Amino acid sequence: MLTLGIDTATKVCTIALIDKEKILAAYEINMGMTHSEGLVPQMDQLFQRTGIAKKDLELIAVSRGPGSFTGLRIGLATAEAMAYGLQIPMIAVSTLEVLAYNLPVDNILLAPVLDAQKGNYYVALYEWHKGELQEVAPVTIMPGKELYGFLEQYNKETVLLGECDKLIIPENENISLAPLWNRLPRGSAVALLGEKLHKAGGDMDYFGTEPFYIRKSEAEELWDKKQQKK
Amino acid sequence: MTEKDVYILGIESSCDETAASVVKNGREVLSNVISTQIPIHRKFGGVVPEIASRKHIEHIMPVMNKALTDAHVTLDQVDAIAVTYGPGLVGALLVGLSAAKALAFALDKPLIGVNHLEGHVFANFLSGENLEPPFLALVVSGGHTSLLIVEDYNTFKLLGQTRDDAAGEAFDKIARFMGLPYPGGPEIEKLAATGNPDSIEFPKPMLPGTFDFSFSGLKSAVINYIHGMEQRGETINKADVAASFQKTIVAVLVEKSKQAIKETGLKEIVLAGGVSANKNLQDALAKGAATVGAKLVHPTKILCTDNAVMIATRGYYMFKHGDRSAYTLNAEPALKLGEK
Ligand SMILES: [Zn+2]
């Protein structure tokens, strides 16, 4: 199944074309350029170079978050409009699961994290078992300084992935960081995960699918707080 | 041989309305879909950018689809996709822009980035008045107050603009200060209708010798007046304040427009932007323009506020002119009139 994967949840702009679990082409850029300027030109080049016709696409998979709100909306609006234009299904996948696809190794606790601003992180825990990714702990937001304690309680060999370079992790034989070149999201993983979910019947409507923000906007949170005080 | 019909799909998401429209040959509106967020932002007293962006992503595809369905036009029939790329809220702009770019890319259709302010001016081509350039345009909105000459469909010459607050911004700030609900402009107009416009003398900022505007001094004068009254424990007649304030701002806009008409000799002036819905301004400008031999054209009510019809119409003339945008097109939150 010819699938296009898109991830703009972080500073990386990454896209890939896969077919039957084979990565046909991928284009990834991590130099802090804006997704708005880069995403469509990047896709244009990917199709041109591969000679694949857009109308032959069968599925569009996009990283839904958590992540940068603006980045997520650029990715989702792009995926929705493309799927709509080509009249093909669209699927949105968890960015944290996408990160866990970088290390498909059994019996290691994977802790993908993404920057949630102001010292906070989105985190979920996963483990691979015989080629299947399993969720150990659902996504939550926590301050970076509590993350270490949270991971330690599992007392298991743990690898951190994602936007973890600002985290201060004490020397610990159990907890390590994934290598820099294997830490960030990949469009190919989005496509692989998307294809799998699509086959399980998990398509999304391109009308009204929202990014996975996890939390309300700051203005709404402040408003809620004010109402509680009253 | 008659020329082939041109269908433009217009997309707009610069502030708090998600809109899409199909316009035929630049002047025939086939659909006009607007999903407004005004009720959502009201409790915050103004547009909250992050909430606006969230609503845009929720509504963009359904709105676009409805615009095509209402118009009975298929994607195949669309000749080009026109989209607002500025000015506006960056996060909001990016939603419509990303969707437009992806659609243009998926279907290999031309992409046309449209300046929102030029769109407002072009809304006047749909007023049923058979308007043709050249003419003068007074753009009055929450972010802009500008006088310009529309020389032809693709050439605009700026005569003057605001040096500080825009007229609409002054309306909004005064409304907020008086505790009126958002959006403040229409609320001031409503309140002013019951007040005496000659009751309070506010300074009239004329900036002689230029076509520039300045409204921050007037705004401060109104706020100081209310403060002073409050400190002296006097009751404020809010309707009188609103009426006097509105009268002053309208007088400046009309005076400058009359000067521009006299200086350019143009016979038509159009109103554009959110504040163009203000009936008081429409009437005063129509009268003022008539005294110097010009006629006022203003958009129909539905096309005064943000919409995608005006984007599709502007897009049509750009399409005819051969203007095309690259896929690298980015949102330009501070885009100016006549800028590329
Ligand atoms: Zn506007």
Image (cartoon, coloured by chain):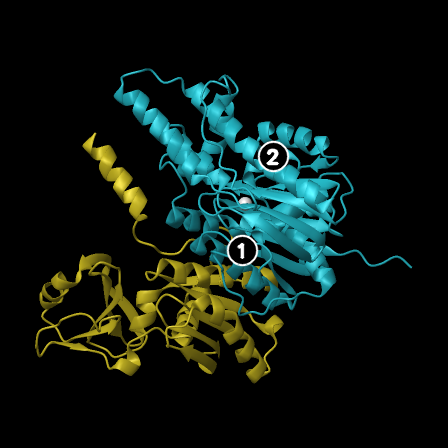
Chain colours: A yellow, B cyan
Q: Secondary structure at mark 1?
A: loop
Q: Residues within 10 Å of mark 1 (few under 14, many from 20)?
A: some
Q: Which residue is at the front of the view, A118 or B202? A: B202
Above or below, comparing residue B163 to residue B271 in the picture? below
Image location of residue B303, percent across then percent down: 62, 40
> Chain for mark 1?
B
Residue A155 in which image quadrant: bottom left
Which badge, 1 or 2, is on the more N-terminal residue? Answer: 2
The outermost residue toward the right is B1
Q: Which residue in the protein does label 1 denote?
A: B336
Circle 2: residue type: Val
Q: Secondary structure at mark 2?
A: helix
Image location of residue A58, percent across then percent down: 55, 69
Q: Which residue is at the front of the view, A155 or A207? A: A207
- Quadrant occupied by the N terminus of chain B: bottom right
- Quadrant occupied by the C terminus of chain B: bottom right
Drawn side of residue B186 relative to residue A144, left or right: right
Residue B81 in which image quadrant: bottom right
Q: Which mark is residue B230?
A: none
Q: Residues within 10 Å of mark 2 (few under 14, many from 20)?
A: many
Image region (quadrant) for ligand 1: top right
- Which residue is depicted at the point 55% across and 37% down? B275
Above or below, comparing residue A216 to residue B300 in the picture? below
Above or below, comparing residue B184 to residue B17 in the picture? above
- Which residue is depicted at the point 42% across and 76% down? A188
Q: Nearer the viewer, mark 1 or mark 2?
A: 2
The answer to the question of whether label 1 and label 2 lie on touching residues, with beta carbons closer than 8 A, is no
Q: Which mark is residue B254?
A: 2
- Which residue is depicted at the point 49% across and 55% down? B93
The reply to whether residue B39 is in sight is no
Circle 1: residue type: Lys
